Image (tube, helix red, strand yellow):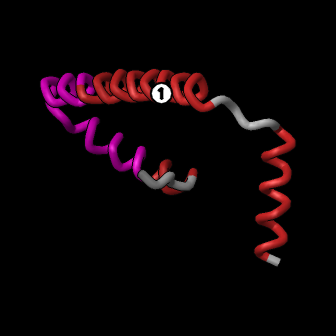
Amino acid sequence: MEMKTDSERKQIIDAINILLNDAYDSTLEEIFTLLKKNEEDEDEDDLKAYDEAKEYIRENGTVSWEEVKNEISAMKKDVA
């Protein structure tokens, strides 16, 4: 999902607030439940990604900082 700029986010939030002010209570409760579920799903996804990363490191080891710097340096030379 693409990240919005601060002004885009503000516009969307303002538009949502206008709609929320006119919404029925039951609709507000449904929206709240949906947002909470999305938040919980994101937390769960983050934990899964963390566990997968730990497993990958356990199986494949890690990369030294020197290797990273050398790769970055080589990539910069290829671009130039």
Give the side of residue 30 with respect to residue 50, left or right.
left
Residue 80 within the segment the image draws in magenta: no
Along the horizontal axis of the image, is 39 left or right of 46? left
Q: Tell me where the magenta segment starts and ends, as one range.
A: 12-33
Tell me the element at label 1: helix
Quarter where residue 44 is shown: top left
Tell me where residue 20 appears, x and y as whole percent. 27, 37
Q: Is residue 34 left or right of residue 40?
A: left
Amino acid bearing label 1 = Glu
Q: Specify whether residue 27 is painted magenta.
A: yes
Q: Residues within 10 Å of mark 1 (few under 14, many from 20)?
A: few
Q: Nearer the viewer, residue 57 or 27?
A: 57
Could you tell me residue 14's position as x and y percent?
41, 46
* Residue at the (49%, 48%) spot, across then down: 10
Total labels drawn: 1
Q: Residue at x 60, y 32 (%)?
A: 60
Residue 23, image x, y percentages = 19, 35
Tell which of 40 and 23 is nearer to you: 40
| Residue at 16 percent of width and 24 percent of height | 25
The residue labelled by disc 1 is 52
Looking at the magenta stretch, what is its main secondary structure?
helix
Viewer-side residue, 21 vs 30: 30
Against 66, residue 54 (above or below) is above
Q: Is residue 38 above or below residue 75?
A: above
Estimate the x, y position of residue 43 in percent, counting from the top left: 43, 23
